Image (cartoon, helix red, strand yellow):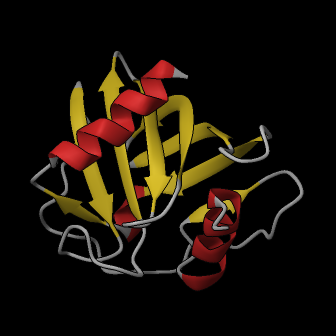
Amino acid sequence: MFSVRLFGRQLSVLVGVVTLFAGGAIAQPVSLIARQNQPTQLADGIYLFGESPQPHQTGHGYIVFEVSNQQVRGAFYLPNSSFDCFVGTVGDQQLDVTVEATYDDETYPAHVDLFSFYSLDHVSSGDRAILSACYAN
């Protein structure tokens, strides 16, 4: 089974965008070109970011989340796989969150550098369903 905790580790190893603080691999964010379509400040709303500039690409990780008063709730996921929910705060192009692992009921902190992802314009019904499931937890 796929674990988003593993997914978080893969992201930290592959692109350096998630830094785990407890019991995981720690990686420094890599230097990537900033995406021109990313806002500098995240207003209240629903967002989708991905490793690919195209949504729902197999083998690429995505982050769907909702911002409300600088608080954030969302999920890390790979298409056609499981997802892990998170809660936390949002800053300038970064998320400081606690991930709630789906399959082992563990939690762990993570820092997500959104500059390392593409900002995607279309949040699909599937993305919204994942987000709703995180609110149900």
| 84 relative position to 20: left or right | left
Residue furthest to the top: 69
Q: Residue at 63% of width from left, 67% of height from top?
A: 2
Considering only vertical position in the picture, is 9 above or below 72? below
Q: Quadrant of the C terminus?
A: top right
Q: Quadrant of residue 23?
A: bottom right
Q: Pick the residue in front: 49 or 17.
A: 49
Residue furthest to the right: 23
Considering only vertical position in the picture, is 66 above or below 80? above
Q: Quadrant of the N terminus?
A: bottom right
Considering only vertical position in the picture, is 81 above or below 87? below
x, y (%) of residue 74? 43, 37
x, y (%) of residue 115? 36, 63
Counting the numbered discs, the total is 0
x, y (%) of residue 29? 57, 72
x, y (%) of residue 71? 44, 22
Residue 20: tell me if it is visible: yes
| 42 relative position to 124: left or right | right
Residue 41: tell me if it is visible: no
Q: Residue at 22% of width from left, 59% of height from top?
A: 119
Q: Pick the residue in front: 123 or 36.
A: 123
Q: Residue at 35% of width from left, 28% of height from top?
A: 132
Q: Residue at 34% of width from left, 67% of height from top?
A: 117
Q: Pick the residue in front: 135 or 115.
A: 135
